């Protein structure tokens, strides 16, 4: 399919929400997919059940927003509906917390494959807090693991909101609760219980080769591109934090199955240096 979009950009800036500096970012869950109808954002009455994950959409505070110039009236007429997906960059605070927790798990399992790790991470301007329960025979310098993960995410200057060299690192880890440990310390494999539980659900679709909704794939690729141009130095003004949102308009095909018709709007939110102008941000991101 070929989608035509206008290159009219609406530019705005916002203060950082947890990223520090002059970031134009907002704190939001990674990659949420939510069906909507019309410009008012109400839930689609006729949306297929496969397109209704139980998650919330949080609109990004956008640096650059591009909207299709096609007539939007159809999206509010009931014949079509809008479906938005949001994705964050690898250095967004939400994702950074995941990366730090994963780094601790990796460090434990590398030295002790039988490690059990229940680790949570919190990041804020100038501080990283790690807390939880860990059972391992490995001797880990958790603070160093944390600082290395922050460095690899690109946070190396207080102006970015976090500097791996000087940030305050608080480690509040202790031994796993005996009550939980006894469930997973059984001598026989068949007697091992669960130390935790969760419910996971999802769906696959035929819109893309990844079997994911097209809006999700596009938003994820845009976020990956934001990280790429930062690492390669293509855009010297861009900083680690960022996120994207793609909204598609869907309509039913001849068989009554909803399918993407066009890209309705794009939002790109990028943390940036104080010196760069809005005009340059728009030109570079578009």
Image (cartoon, grey):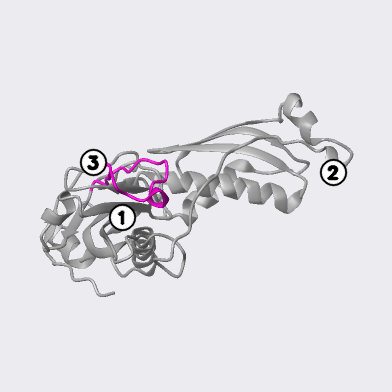
Q: Which mark is residue 259?
A: none
Q: Earlier along the polypeptide chain: callout 1 or callout 2?
A: 2
Pick whichever, 243 or 166, lies toward us: 243
Q: Name the spot of residue 53 as percent of width and height, x first.
A: 42, 45
Of helix, strand and loop, which one carries label 2?
Answer: helix
Residue 250: image x %, image y %?
Answer: 27, 59
Q: Is residue 96 visible?
A: yes
Residue highlighted by disc 1: 244
Residue highlighted by disc 3: 42
Quadrant of the snapshot with the C terminus: bottom left
Determine the main secondary structure of the stretch shown in magenta.
loop
Asked if residue 44 lies in the magenta stretch, the reply is yes
Whether the residues at callouts 3 and 2 have beta carbons within 8 Å, the answer is no
Q: How many marks overall?
A: 3
Measured Cα–Cα span from mark 1 to mark 2? 44 Å
Whether tag 1 and tag 3 are in contact, CB under 8 A, the answer is no
Secondary structure at badge 3 equals: loop
Horizontal relation, residue 157 to residue 78: left or right = right
Residue 272 in sight: no
* Labels 1, 2: front one: 2
Mark 3 closeness class: few <14, some 14–19, many ≥20 residues within 10 Å:
few
Label 1 element class: strand
Write the residue at 66% across / 50% down: 107
Q: Which residues are magenta?
A: 43-61
Q: Determine which quarter of the picture holds residue 141.
A: top right
Can you give x and y, in whole percent of width and height, for residue 208 in the image? 41, 68
């Amino acid at each position: 399919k070929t989608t035509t979009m206008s290159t009219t950009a609406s530019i705005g800036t916002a203060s950082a929400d947890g990223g520090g500096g002059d970031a134009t970012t907002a704190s939001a869950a990674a990659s949420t997919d939510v069906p909507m109808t019309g410009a008012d954002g109400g839930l689609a009455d006729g949306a297929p059940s496969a397109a209704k994950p139980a998650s919330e959409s949080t609109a990004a505070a956008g640096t650059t927003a591009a909207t299709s110039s096609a007539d939007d009236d159809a999206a509010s007429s009931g014949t079509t509906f809008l479906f938005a997906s949001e994705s964050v960059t690898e250095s967004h605070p939400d994702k950074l917390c995941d990366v730090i927790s994963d780094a601790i798990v990796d460090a434990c399992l590398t030295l002790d494959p039988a490690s059990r790790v229940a680790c949570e991470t919190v990041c804020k301007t100038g501080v990283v807090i790690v807390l939880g329960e860990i059972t391992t025979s490995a001797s880990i310098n958790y603070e160093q693991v944390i600082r290395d993960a922050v460095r690899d995410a690109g946070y190396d200057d207080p102006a970015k909101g976090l500097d791996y060299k000087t940030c305050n690192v608080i480690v509040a880890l202790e031994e796993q609760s005996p009550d939980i440990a006894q469930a997973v310390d059984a001598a026989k494999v068949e007697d091992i219980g669960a130390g935790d539980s969760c419910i996971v659900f999802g769906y696959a679709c035929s819109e893309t080769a990844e079997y994911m909704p097209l809006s999700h794939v596009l938003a994820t690729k845009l976020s990956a591109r934001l990280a790429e141009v930062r690492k390669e130095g293509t855009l010297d003004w861009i900083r680690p934090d960022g996120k994207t949102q793609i909204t598609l308009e869907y309509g039913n095909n001849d068989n009554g199955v909803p399918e993407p018709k066009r890209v309705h709007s794009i939002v790109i939110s990028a943390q940036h240096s104080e010196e760069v102008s809005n005009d340059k941000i728009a030109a570079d991101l578009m």
